[in-house]
Amino acid sequence: MISATIGPRAALRAPRAICIVLALLAGGSLLAALEPPSKPFLDKNSFYLTSAGFKPQFAEDAAAKKALHALPPHRFVIHDNGGNPRYLWAEPLHCVCVFIGSSDAYQNYRAILAQPLPQADNVAPDYKTQASALLTGNDPIGIDTIGDDTVMPYYSAYY
């Protein structure tokens, strides 16, 4: 029942205002997730990838750069290499390379992110946000979903 002191229009606007506020909050968190990673985070993430067993393949020629840019940045792409999956992580900003690793390397990386090493006092404020974004909702995508057939011929030589 609508109160006599609040008109029917005002009673209908309140739920709409709540929905607008919730949408703005969700949009703000989405924008934070789309923000490019900071240099301190990229330094740390490259260290974690190599510590987990990923090997960097640097894009030093035109074919390598084309293959690198065909992959989505800062996202795992999985390629099932005859029952032997390989995980690729494109890093076009920091090292201009692709980290390539096995299922074990991927599991090691996830374990490192879940239990990060003790941090120095000068850790970037975005570290926990960005590491959390990597751990949640960032499952690897299939290599066949990126729509570029130059990637696998180039990187399969490094398996």
Image (spheres, rainbow, N blue to C red):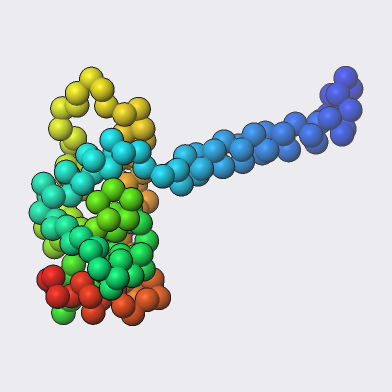
Location of residue 58 with respect to 156 vertically, above or below: above
Of residues 17 and 47, the one drawn nearer to the viewer in this rendering: 47
Quarter placement of the C terminus: bottom left
Location of residue 84 with respect to 22 vertically, above or below: below
Location of residue 134 with respect to 22 vertically, above or below: below
Of residues 13 and 114, the one drawn nearer to the viewer in this rendering: 114
Using the rendered view, name the quadrant where residue 77 is placed. Answer: bottom left
The residue that appears at 86% across and 24% down in the rendered structure is 6
The residue that appears at 35% across and 56% down in the rendered structure is 73
Location of residue 94 with respect to 89 vertically, above or below: above
Residue 142 visible:
no
Residue 36 visible:
yes
Using the rendered view, name the quadrant where residue 100 is placed. Answer: bottom left
Quarter placement of the N terminus: top right
From the top left corner, tell me how far across and down residue 40 is, in percent.
28, 35
Q: Is residue 107 left or right of residue 130?
A: left
From the top left corner, tell me how far across and down residue 153 is, in percent.
23, 79
From the top left corner, tell me how far across and down residue 93 is, in percent.
33, 50
From the top left corner, tell me how far across and down residue 38 is, in percent.
35, 38
Q: Is residue 108 left or right of residue 72?
A: left
- Number of callouts in the render? 0
The residue that appears at 19% across and 35% down in the rendered structure is 116
The residue that appears at 22% across and 39% down in the rendered structure is 44
